[in-house]
Amino acid sequence: MNIKTDKPTSAVSTRKVEEAEATAFLERVRSNQHHLRSGLRSHYDFIVCGSGSSGSVVARRLAENPKVHVLLLEAGGRDDVPQVMEANQWPLNLGSERDWGFQSKPTASLNGRAVHMAMGKVLGGGSSINVMVWARGHKSDWDYFAEEAKDPAWNYDSVLKIYRRIEDWNGSPDPEYRGVGGPVFVEPAPNPNPIAPAMLEAAQSIGIPTFENQNGRMMEGDGGASIVDVRAKGGKRQSIFRSYVYPMMDRENLTVLTGALVLRLNIEKGRTTGVDVLLDGVLIKFAATKEIVLSMGAIQTPKLLMQSGIGDEYELRRHGIPVLQHLPGVGKNFQDHIAFDCVWEYLDPLPPRNNMAEATFFWKSDPTVPTPDIQACLAEVPKTSPENAARHDMPQHGYTLFGGLMRPKSRGYLSLAGPSPNDPIEIEANFFSHPDDLKVALECVELCRDIGNAAPLRAFSKREVMPGPLKGLALEDFVRTAATTYWHETCTAKMGTDEMSVVNGRLQVYGIQSLRIADGSIMPRVTTGNTMAPCVIIGERAAEELSKDHGL
Ligand SMILES: Cc1cc2nc3c(=O)[nH]c(=O)nc-3n(C[C@H](O)[C@H](O)[C@H](O)COP(=O)(O)OP(=O)(O)OC[C@H]3O[C@@H](n4cnc5c(N)ncnc54)[C@H](O)[C@@H]3O)c2cc1C
């Protein structure tokens, strides 16, 4: 009898102790950061601009050395709001003050439509507003990065070691592929909605094998289907900022400033010396004695570079910006996973669970392509573009196969609207500018329909809402009206060695000293699958190189 009553009592008391410790830590963080903010230094050893999926990692790794003073600058605000913390509230961030709310330019290839391109503007960046899927990328992506960088530190074997070191895997033990005890808690979506395993059965019924999770063997071959790996624990989002930076914020050597908009780099004789920052409406100059790291994401990092005089000389001169370094690749090579929705209405509505997207598959549009070039996530709500919604009878309750192109061949570019930091950036996403992308998109829609209409999923559906059995030009028109972003904007300051490369394999900006880039913009090619985990690797790699160069 004692045993029965003791267990819950000790569980309750353990929880109370943990809560008390968390409250005490929060108090220490508040008081330390208040103290640091009211006594800002004029210079720091390192300044990290942007607290997203990569920047949080860089700041944390540098600040692990107590002798190193790190300033982390974030334009957005605090993340301790339910829309960020509660995993199932993520859609509420779209269009909110935590979203930069970029828009691509309208284009004929999308039937004259512009696409809303959300990116996180809050502590944690994208990792605080995203769908929390942890997707490492395909083996071939990392081997390609290594080839482009001419540096084996980026190859799959090296990166797999980093993944194992940083993960705290809460699924079935798999030491060959998964690590435990690191900062990145990750697990297969627990107790998923019954429709998620049904999607795996449906995929299997047309020959797509099921894997134990999406991040081990499945990402070394032709693809497969699995329950997704998510970064949520007990229904709470685990952002990269919360996992990496927050536990260090009671330290004297790590200053984290919110509402700090980086306006411009200060560059003297080819060396970056500091940044101009708008903090609470006041212009402040911070100097970096060692290095500055740009981690502001694939739209804002190239914008800042160009407005600071680093970019294509023709583009800079067009806006009267003095050219400090001609790098024609800045803002070019824009990539995203072009995406579209196939929707079914529920027979009996099932409330979404976990991150509302608990199953996924990767597959090939054609058996001859070397690696998977199609992915779809099963979203447990009906969703589509506003233009497409207006054409269809959208149900209140339904589910979506959100398909996308993993190896798009279309390339977009960014251009300045003016020289001032207040001038917006223009995004020419160029979706479907390469004809092969449309072909793969049509294959992807057909595959989603085959899976969505296979018996295991048909059992859940009242009707297929879209696209239905369209063919030829009608199906093309559907895809062009549906096409949207997978929110994986990347590749606009690519790593490599050709003339369009912006950084080398050690992430140093060509031609400028003491300046690195660590964020999604350095990808030479968008990875296969969602992009947060690869951005964490980019942050870890940047930290490795900085530690080596500065003897940290
Ligand atoms: C809605 C949504 C859903 C997504 N779902 C997933 C998912 O489920 N899984 C996944 O793997 N990926 C997902 N992604 C993509 C993923 O979150 C991003 O690829 C990743 O966060 C990019 O990391 P980053 O470091 O390049 O930039 P970000 O994480 O975007 O961080 C950039 C940071 O810099 C700050 N910043 C920008 N400009 C300035 C400035 N001038 N001054 C100061 N600070 C500045 C920003 O506010 C932001 O905090 C999603 C993204 C979105 C938007």
Image: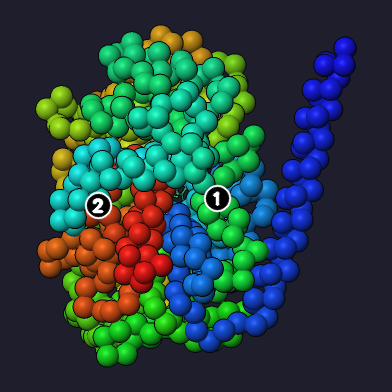
Amino acid under label 2? Ala
Give the quarter the ligand 1 occupies. Answer: bottom left
* Marks 1 & 2, CB-CB < 8 Å contact: no
N-terminal of the pair, mark 1 or mark 2, is 2
Q: Name the residue under label 1.
A: 243
Residue 173 lies left or right of residue 23; in this view the side is: left
* Above or below, comparing residue 257 to residue 179 in the picture: below
Please give the count of numbered marks on the rendered protein. 2
Along the line of sight, the residue nearer the viewer: 122 or 176: 176
Horizontal side, residue 108 vs residue 458: left or right: left
Locate residue 400, reporting x and y percent: 45, 29
Q: In the displayed structure, would residue 222 be above or below residue 72? A: above
Q: How crowded is mark 1: few (under 14 residues within 10 Å), some or many (20 or more)?
A: some
In the drawing, what numbered circle is on residue 367? none
Q: What element carries label 2?
A: helix
Q: In which quarter of the image is residue 527?
A: top left
Q: Name the side, left or right, on which 7 lies relative to 273.
A: right
Q: What's the residue type where badge 1 is placed? A: Ser
Q: Can residue 441 be seen in this view?
A: no
Query: Going 31% across and 23% down the picture, which residue do you hit?
Result: 224
Q: Mark 1 falls on what kind of element? A: helix
Q: Position of residue 280 (x, y in %)?
A: 62, 79
Q: How is the image coloured?
A: rainbow
Front of the two marks 1 and 2:
2
Circle 2 residue: 153
